[in-house]
Image (tube, rainbow, N blue to C red):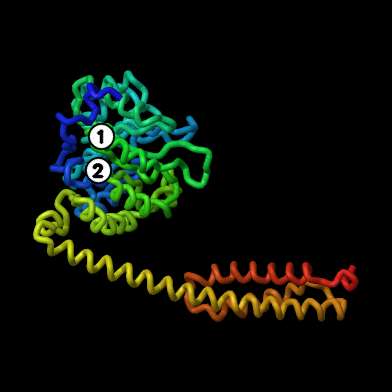
Amino acid sequence: MSATLKASLNGENKRTVVEIGHGMSIGGGSLLIIAGPCSVESEEQMELVGNALSGTGIGAIRGGVFKPRTSPYSFQGMGEEGLRIMSRLSQEHKMPVVTEVMSEKQADMAVHFADVLQIGSRNMQNFELLKHVGTLRKPVILKRGLCATLEELVLAAEYILAGGNENVILCERGIRSYDNATRNVLDLGGVVALRQMTHLPILVDPSHACGRSELIADLARAAVACGADGLMIECHPEPAKSVSDARQAISLQEMVDIVRSLEPIAHAVGREIRGPHMNLNLHAESEKGILHKEHMHAYDGLMSELSSLRNEIDAADVQIAELLEKRLKLVLQIGSLKQELKVPWRDIAREREVIEAVCSTCSDKRVSGKIRHIYERIIEASRQVQVENAMPSRVVA
């Protein structure tokens, strides 16, 4: 890639720091965390988001008001009304807000309400749109296309830079592959490579990369460890009820927990987590080294507790396996007797009696339903092992 490009990293330009409003920036020593729902659904929803995330170390709130959906019949966003909700949220909580635009008209509207404009992966090479946001002087997050190379991403950013807008933030959000275990493949190697190609700050979006809420925390920590300047994560007051991308949305509490888990990793790579009016003055205290140590001790304590609980689970699993083996051996003996007696393999009344007896011993209603489900599978397996090990000459017709 040519060293003469505005986006290229060379000996003369330092890493760019982009100011996004309300004292927040990305690049340098700060780690910017952007969080919020995929779509703005109502003012009440966004108020819950703002109240939960303000003061936690999260630097900006995201929310889609113009939604690029695969189906034209899916929810397309609240449009201008959603922009007004985002603007009021920003003013009330003194936090910058981020929203996606898909056309020049939408960009011209959003520029009056949002602090940062986002160009989604489907529009990474919408060159007319890139040229247009290059004239707006508003910070722009440019997401990598679904199948775009790193060079193509940087050249797309060049369109914005060439228009005079130097406030460009690149975003790795996963690329398509043949594997369907995750929604996309998060290219963390690409993040490392981008840092050697360009001076522009780099965000990582683990939500769209994996498409599975249970994978997001680990990918977020890995992204910070490999040099990302920030993260953009989808969270929702009620993830299962999200009108879009519910499978990858995490709860607001899970979002806050992720931020806490990132603190020692950020410190290890020379960064700090900052957010507007944080409840804990992490920036000032971390300079003294006091609060960081306290957080490290707390984190180590939690990790120790987690390890201890996992050890208990391992021991319980061994006991469960031994008891299941004992049960199935007894089942085989019963199967032989059934053949001798020429009685049916299945006794439904007996199965119900066993399941009810087991479930009645459960004192915790949170797990009793799951235990019922598990025992139904155990009894089904017991029937199968009887049939599979029956003597052919004695099988009842």
Q: What residue is shown with label 2? A: 229
Picture quadrant where residue 322 is located? bottom right
Earlier-in-chain disc, 2 versus 1 = 1
Q: Nearer the viewer, residue 228 or 104?
A: 228
Q: For residue 381, which numbered disc appears in the image?
A: none
The three-letter code of the residue at mark 1 reads Ile
Give residue 174's position: percent from left, percent from top. 40, 39
Q: SS of the residue at dot 2?
A: loop
Question: Is residue 268 among the parts visible in the rendering?
Answer: yes
Residue furthest to the front in view is 11
The three-letter code of the residue at mark 2 reads Asp
Residue at (68, 71) in percent of width and height: 379
* 83 lies left or right of 306: left
| Label 2 Cα crowd, 10 Å radius (few <14 / some 14-19 / many 20+) | many
| Label 1 Cα crowd, 10 Å radius (few <14 / some 14-19 / many 20+) | many
Q: SS of the residue at dot 1?
A: strand
Question: Is residue 243 among the parts visible in the rendering?
Answer: no
- How far is mark 2 from mark 1, CA to CA? 9 Å
Give residue 25's position: percent from left, percent from top. 17, 41
Q: Nearer the viewer, residue 9 or 258?
A: 9
Q: Nearer the viewer, residue 304 or 57?
A: 304
* 366 lies left or right of 168: right
Picture quadrant where residue 278 is located? bottom left
205 to 251, vertically: above or below: above
Q: Quadrant of the C terminus?
A: bottom right
Residue at (35, 31) in percent of width and height: 150
Residue at (87, 77) in percent of width and height: 342
362 to 385, vertically: above or below: below
Q: Quadrant of the N terminus?
A: top left
Q: What residue is shown with label 1? A: 169
Give residue 169's position: percent from left, percent from top. 25, 34
Dots 2, 1 in contact, CB < 8 A = yes
